[in-house]
């Protein structure tokens, strides 16, 4: 019989609006696991970053790196049993790289950031997730979800930004190798339309253990 160990750490990744938070909650409820979410309330750089990308992008990424590293360590020290919303790997592979490509982070800062990331995370000592669930779907479906949840800041964001983010995620996951990856297409596993599909998701996930 397939089984997911109660000390597993499972990370949910995917572009904005794809349904990471919904899946994180559903999986945690189904498996009786705890959840781990990004902490933004006490972030000292977030507001400054949105006012001045170029000045604060490096500071923000370093802050996220430190916080995610501490969180990964905490989950392991507590014995696992966690579903995690967004991975530490997305910060460097998606967001820091995007700033560097667009010139809102200098190449020197980006090299410093990636060197630190590799020293902290890309080592045998870093506690990697047991499985990374990559949520994906066609661009139009994801855009519909972003519009449906109605966050004002997201509704005002140019379509080109969401398209770029979507493409960057697809490029990133194609070479991701830090841990096993379970790909779930939201058109086949749509928790918003059919909550019972969590049973199928758990079955798929259990084949990785």
Image: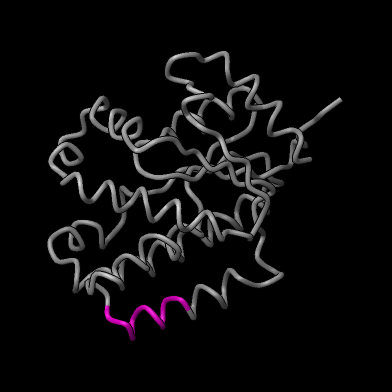
Using residue 38 as the reference point, say whether residue 28 is left or right of it.
right
Residue at 31% over, 47% down: 41
Residue 22 to residue 72: above or below: above
Q: In this view, does 38 lie above or below 201?
A: below
Tell which of 58 and 159 is nearer to you.
159
139 relative to 108, above or below: above
- Residue 39 horizontal/vertical position (percent): 39, 48
Q: How many labels does the image show?
A: 0
**Above-or-below relation of 45 to 116:** above
- Quadrant (top left/top right/bottom left/bottom right) for the N terminus: top right
Say which residue appears at 40% left-offset and 60% top-offset.
94
Q: In which quarter of the image is residue 26?
A: top right
Residue found 63% across the figure and 32% down from its top: 33
Q: In which quadrant of the rendered view does residue 174 lie?
A: bottom right
If the image is split into quadrants, where does the C terminus sit?
Answer: top right
* 5 horizontally vs 58: left or right: right
Is residue 64 or residue 102 the one in the foreground? 102
Q: Where is residue 22 in the image (x, y as percent from the top left)?
A: 45, 28
Q: Where is residue 164 in the image (x, y as percent from the top left)?
A: 29, 53
Instruction: Check residue 110 for magenta coloring.
Output: yes
Using residue 165 as the reference point, say whether residue 130 is left or right of it: right
Indicate whether residue 199 is drawn in magenta: no
Q: What stretch is highlighted in magenta?
A: 106-114
Main secondary structure along the magenta-highlighted residues: helix
Question: Which residue is at 58% across, 18% downward?
Answer: 197
Q: Where is residue 166 in the image (x, y as percent from the top left)?
A: 36, 48
């Amino acid at each position: 019989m397939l089984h997911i160990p109660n000390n597993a750490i499972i990370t949910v990744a995917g572009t904005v609006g794809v349904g990471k938070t919904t899946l994180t909650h559903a999986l945690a409820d189904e498996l009786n696991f705890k959840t781990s979410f990004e902490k933004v309330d006490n972030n000292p750089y977030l507001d400054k970053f949105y006012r001045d990308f170029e000045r604060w992008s490096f500071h923000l990424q370093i802050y996220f790196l430190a916080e995610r590293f501490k969180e990964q360590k905490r989950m392991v020290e507590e014995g696992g049993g966690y579903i995690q919303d967004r991975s530490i790997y997305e910060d460097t592979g998606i967001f820091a790289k995007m700033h560097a490509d667009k010139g809102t982070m200098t190449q020197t800062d980006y090299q410093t950031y990636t060197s630190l990331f590799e020293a902290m995370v890309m080592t045998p000592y870093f506690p990697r997730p047991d499985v990374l669930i990559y949520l994906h779907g066609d661009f139009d479906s994801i855009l519909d979800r972003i519009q449906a949840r109605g966050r004002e800041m997201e509704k005002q964001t140019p379509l080109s930004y969401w398209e770029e983010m979507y493409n960057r995620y697809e490029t990133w996951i194609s070479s991701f190798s830090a841990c096993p990856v379970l790909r779930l297409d939201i058109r086949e596993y749509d928790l918003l339309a059919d909550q019972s599909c969590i049973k199928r998701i758990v079955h798929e996930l259990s084949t990785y253990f």
